């Protein structure tokens, strides 16, 4: 009997080790809960893609979360209680985010939720979080309607209504493009971004000569690119994620289209560079976070992240890191009651942020007040700060 128990324990231990090695997220309490309620973990639920087409974003999130958790807990956690996350894989599928939302709302241990990745997937679950009185913190959700879901719906992501005019200003005013063609992913985020960009570009004096939508699973864009070529644009704008954006860039170059390319900040990922190769050289984009930012708070974060993972942080790992530290700050100030945490987001002022410097929210829009943004270009296979002088010299 004793031998059987030993073998059973060894099997469980080995299974958990294998799951960990494969990167499968384990339940927050897989090693048991503390007996003392005052020492029980404070738990944040995360709904996001660990598998599926957006899995790379979830992997980047996990790195940012892990580093932030280490820092919070090394500093004493939340009034002596450790902070934990419970990461549920949604594949950023609206059907799965709804099921996860019901699970999180029903779990009294969870004090707030972070995610999901896409605005469409997050907004499908928003009514459940709002009705259940659990903060949904969409730190990558840029859809202008996201926070309109109710007073429990918050975001520190740059609003599309803010981001697209910034991107249009980069394309039209800074780069001098006057005839632009748009390629956009045909989902709610893509259509909204396309419309906002087109409006801002026209107001800046440019003409939008064509707009081609495509489905998320498309791989062959050649027919759309022929139509783009026939509009004779002097610049091409991509409203894409990193994988489809890189594929379009490759096929653009293969089709002989050499016009400047400006892409939404959603392409800002190492995977965009890896998948696009030489075809993405010279692509312009924007981001709230850039590891080359000289601010001390940024460089301290970059140094810690690079030491741990061997690569620099990107926009999505930094956003996850920032979001978790922000919620930890609010929980320390306001407590773990779900309603108190919601109210605390409205009153927190100048919370430290590697993305924005400091954070405070507009209590009406429930978004960050006066967010930053940085212009980038792909140069020598890496993202680099865009330098206006280089454009003037070339002209």
Image: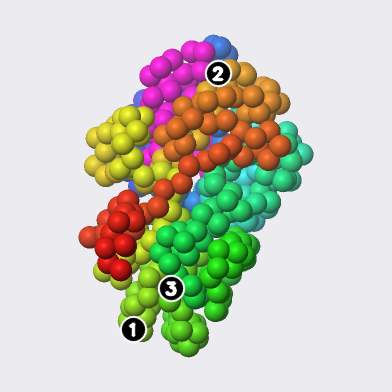
Residue 135: percent from left, percent from top: 65, 35
Front residue of 201/216: it is 201
Q: Nearer the viewer, mark 2 or mark 1?
A: 1
Distance from the alpha carbon under mark 3 to that under mark 2: 48 Å
In the picture of the structure, the residue carrying the numbered disc 1 is 256
Give the quadrant of the C terminus: bottom left
Q: Quadrant of residue 38?
A: top right
Residue located 44% across and 38% down the image: 355
Which type of secondary structure does the marked residue at label 1 adopt?
loop
The span shown in magenta is 62-88
The extreme right residue here reads: 131
Query: Which disc, if any, is residue 235?
Result: 3
On screen, residue 316 versus residue 278, left or right, reads: right
Cα distance, mark 2 to mark 1? 56 Å
Instruction: Give the mark nearer the N terminus: 2 vs 1.
Output: 1
Q: What's the residue at 36%, 64% (across, down)?
A: 283
Nearest-to-viewer mark from 3 and 2 = 3
Q: In the rendered view, would you say 153 is above or below 300?
A: below
Q: Which mark is residue 344?
A: none
Q: Residues within 10 Å of mark 2 (few under 14, many from 20)?
A: some
3 and 76: which one is in front? 76
The residue where tag 2 is placed is 332
Depicted 185 relative to depicted 320: above or below = below
């Amino acid at each position: 009997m004793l031998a059987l128990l030993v073998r059973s324990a060894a099997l469980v231990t080995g299974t958990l080790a294998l799951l960990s090695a494969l990167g499968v997220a384990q339940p927050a309490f897989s090693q048991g809960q503390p007996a003392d309620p005052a020492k029980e973990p404070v738990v944040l639920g995360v709904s996001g893609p660990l598998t599926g087409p957006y899995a790379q974003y979830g992997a980047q999130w996990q790195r940012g979360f892990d580093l932030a958790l280490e820092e919070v807990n090394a500093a004493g956690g939340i009034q002596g209680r450790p902070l934990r996350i419970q990461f549920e894989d949604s594949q950023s599928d609206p059907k799965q985010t709804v099921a996860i939302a019901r699970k999180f709302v029903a779990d009294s241990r969870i004090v707030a939720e972070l995610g999901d990745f896409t605005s469409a997937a997050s907004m499908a679950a928003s009514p459940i979080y709002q009705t259940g009185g659990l903060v949904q913190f969409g730190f990558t959700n840029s859809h202008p309607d996201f926070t309109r879901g109710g007073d429990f719906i918050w975001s520190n992501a740059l609003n599309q209504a803010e981001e697209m005019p910034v991107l249009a200003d980069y394309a039209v005013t800074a780069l001098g493009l006057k005839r632009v063609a748009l390629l956009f992913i045909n989902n709610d985020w893509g259509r909204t971004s396309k419309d906002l960009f087109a409006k801002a570009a026209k107001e800046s004096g440019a003409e939008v000569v064509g707009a081609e939508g495509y489905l998320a699973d498309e791989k062959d864009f050649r027919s759309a690119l022929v139509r783009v070529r026939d509009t004779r644009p002097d610049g091409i704008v991509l409203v894409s994620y990193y994988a489809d954006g890189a594929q379009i860039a490759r096929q653009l170059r293969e089709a002989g289209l050499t016009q400047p390319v400006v892409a939404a900040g959603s392409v800002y990922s190492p995977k965009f560079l890896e998948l696009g190769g030489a075809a993405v050289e010279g692509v312009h984009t924007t981001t709230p976070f850039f590891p080359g930012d000289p601010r001390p708070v940024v460089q301290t974060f970059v140094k810690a992240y690079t030491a741990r993972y061997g690569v620099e942080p990107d926009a999505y790992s930094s956003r996850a890191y920032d979001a978790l530290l922000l919620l930890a700050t609010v929980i320390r100030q306001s407590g773990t009651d779900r309603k108190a945490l919601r109210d605390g987001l409205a009153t927190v002022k100048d919370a430290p942020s590697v993305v924005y410097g400091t954070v405070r929210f507009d209590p009406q829009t429930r978004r960050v007040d006066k967010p930053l943004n940085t212009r980038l270009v792909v140069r020598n296979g890496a993202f680099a700060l865009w330098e206006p002088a280089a454009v003037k010299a070339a002209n």
